[in-house]
Amino acid sequence: ELGMMPALQHIRFASNPGLVGTLPLSFSSLSTLHLLDLSSTGLRGAIPPELSRLEQLTDLIVTQTQLEGTLPLEMGQMTQLRNLNLSHNLLLGTLPDLQWNRLKHLKVLDLSQNKQLTGQLPLSWNFQYLETLALNGNNWTGWFPDPPYGSSLVYIYLHDTPFL
């Protein structure tokens, strides 16, 4: 069991469709984990709030799986995140105001192609160091918030998105 390896820093099981089930809660005990890549697997279900215990996690990449449900508010506690990529899943609902301003190190945010993410973008977004923002292929409404003064944004992907 991976949860019994407390010094583990990287887990990359990408492109492994035989990996099925839900995100294991035992991952939340890996306090030294920096990278978790479970893309293109057979994982399904909700993102467990317990993942927020991964306080050293810098890269959370879970694309092209069957993740569903909403983003847990507790993700705002993952203050070391640099890359949050949850694209091509079945996430739905509005984005919670999970204290996005606490994610000061975030450089890449990719929530594209979830189709069922809706509503307005949180006003608490203040990604001073964000370089890539991919929100395309969802059902956002309202206005796209102005990037902060001195923003580092280089890429913004909003195609196939009904912003006003």
Image (cartoon, grey):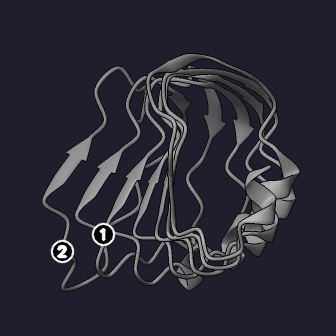
Point out residue 74 in the picture as x, y percentages from the top left corner.
79, 68
Circles 2 and 1: CB atoms closer than 8 Å: yes
* Secondary structure of residue under mark 1: loop
Q: What's the residue type where badge 2 is placed?
A: Ser
Q: What's the residue type where badge 1 is placed?
A: Leu
Quadrant occupied by the C terminus: top left
Task: Tell me which residue sits at (79%, 60%) in the image.
Answer: 3
Task: Tell me which residue sits at (18%, 85%) in the image.
Answer: 150
Q: Is residue 100 above or below residue 102?
A: above
> How far is disc 2 from disc 1 in space, using C-alphas?
6 Å
Left or right of residue 37, residue 95 in this image = right
Q: In this view, does 33 lie above or below 27?
A: below
Point out residue 34 in the picture as x, y percentages from the top left corner.
50, 70
Residue at numbered disc 1: 130
Which label's residue is closer to the chain start, 2 or 1? 1
Left or right of residue 109, residue 72 in this image = right
Residue extending farthest to the left is: 154
Point out residue 83 in the picture as x, y percentages from the top left corner.
40, 60
Residue at numbered disc 2: 152
Q: Residue 148 carries which label?
A: none
